[in-house]
Amino acid sequence: PLRGRQALRGDLLDFSATPAWAALDDPAVRYRPDHWLLIDADGRIAGVQAHEPDASWQRRDYRGRLILPGFIDTHVHCPQLDVIASYGTELLDWLNTYTFPAETRYADPAVARLGAERFLDALLAHGTTSAVVFPTVHKVSAEMLFEAAAVRGMRLITGKVLMDRHAPDALRDDVAGAERDCVDLIQRYHQRERLAYAVTVRFAPTSTPEQLAMAGALCRADASLYMQTHVAENRDEVAWVARLFPQARSYLDVYARESLLHPRAVLAHGIWLDEQDRRVLAASGAQVAHCPSSNLFLGSGLFDWVAAREAGYTVSAASDVGGGTSLSMQRTLADGYKMQALGGRRLTAWAALHAATLGAAQGLGLQQEIGAFEAGTLADVCVWDWACGPVAQARDAVVRGLHERVFAWLTLSDERNLVASYVAGVPRFRRDPESEPT
Ligand code: GUN
Ligand code: ZN
């Protein structure tokens, strides 16, 4: 449906550049309290202004609320909503005990369709408007995600999972069939609307060297393709990879040798890397999707964010549900703060929020489309309550300074604070449709 021009009034917060690691006061932070965000009829941001626009704009008054760019979750598993919060295991046992059985059900197109719709609606209800997503090995699971994202107008990057060994029969493909499925999905969905294809290697242990070579050939043939995988998450996993690939220098090197590291590659975790790996990552332009909730829940380890900054590769933030225990990016980032604290470091609210917005967008090469309130980008925008409930409200009433306020919001808020999510200017989630401002 055609929509008029809209103007959203509230406290606008975004970034114009990368904030310095430890700075509480940083010129890259753009806070414009009680401003208007102007959205053109085509769903693109027209600009930001302090004064009320004229009546040719449909005005939506979110005064006293926080307005942020929609969050970007750079690593999350659609079929794992069914196993979120599963007790008692580390990565390899968790995969075998919970995850693989749940993924088996996605061979059924009806399960895949309902799962994709429920998953994307849940992202929008958590303030996440863009995501890099793992479906399952089944071609239909990727198709259903692409179709459901297109209906919602969302920026979505996904691709059929490649796994041809060390998995149950019902979750294994083979090199030739997988290549056919990838080629067909790329033709049908890659760069259609806001969709893009990611060559999706689950992780090194579940692909034969032949399948890794096929994945690398796909990436070499089309530099616009994304690549997503897992790397160096868990110590037992790292040891297993060393046994499976004795000729590789490191876990990361298994991917490097097959030309899977490039500027559109997203590698989840990256905990157990060495200095040589960090140099290789930085030179490749690939990004690490840091998943603190998952790393703590599965006992995987502590991510060294400072070493990543020093090496110079992009770190984005990711929920990694169902290893992670919430789709909320605030909860994810609050866990990120606590993880850095365990290492004697402090993560500012600015570094955290940047990693879930503009930083992720830049890492994906999508800063012309998402990540900040820049004119010409698509209006993926979320409106948040500054505080819900007596504890957060009492805290918010006594904060001193902007960083203190935003940090308390990040630590105490979650999806219950979400008032509305707009995707390309269209409201796709509203908490209280009756009392929405017009
Ligand atoms: N490594 C391989 N597969 C997975 C997965 O599904 N989740 C996580 N956290 N790590 C993995
Ligand atoms: Zn994962």
Image: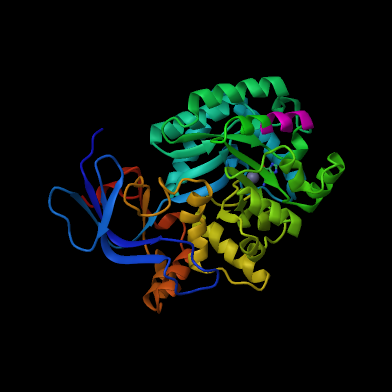
Residue 174 appears in the figure: no
Does residue 80 appear anywhere in the picture?
A: yes
Image quadrant occupied by the N terminus: top left
The one of 309 and 171 positioned closer to us in this rendering:
309
Residue placed most toward the observer, 123 or 83:
123
Q: Position of residue 363 (x, y in %)?
A: 53, 50
Residue pictured at 75% horizontal, 25% vertical? 169
Seen in the picture, residue 297 relative to 216 is either above or below; the reply is: below
Does 408 appear in magenta? no
Image position of 334 with respect to 38: above or below:
below
Residue 418 picture location, percent across and down:
39, 54
Q: Nearer the viewer, residue 307 or 68?
A: 307
Quadrant assignment, res 262: top right
Q: Is residue 239 left or right of residue 286?
A: right
Q: Which residues are magenta?
A: 209-216
Residue 291 position (above or below residue 173): below
Residue 216 falls left or right of residue 223: right
Predominant SS along the magenta part: helix
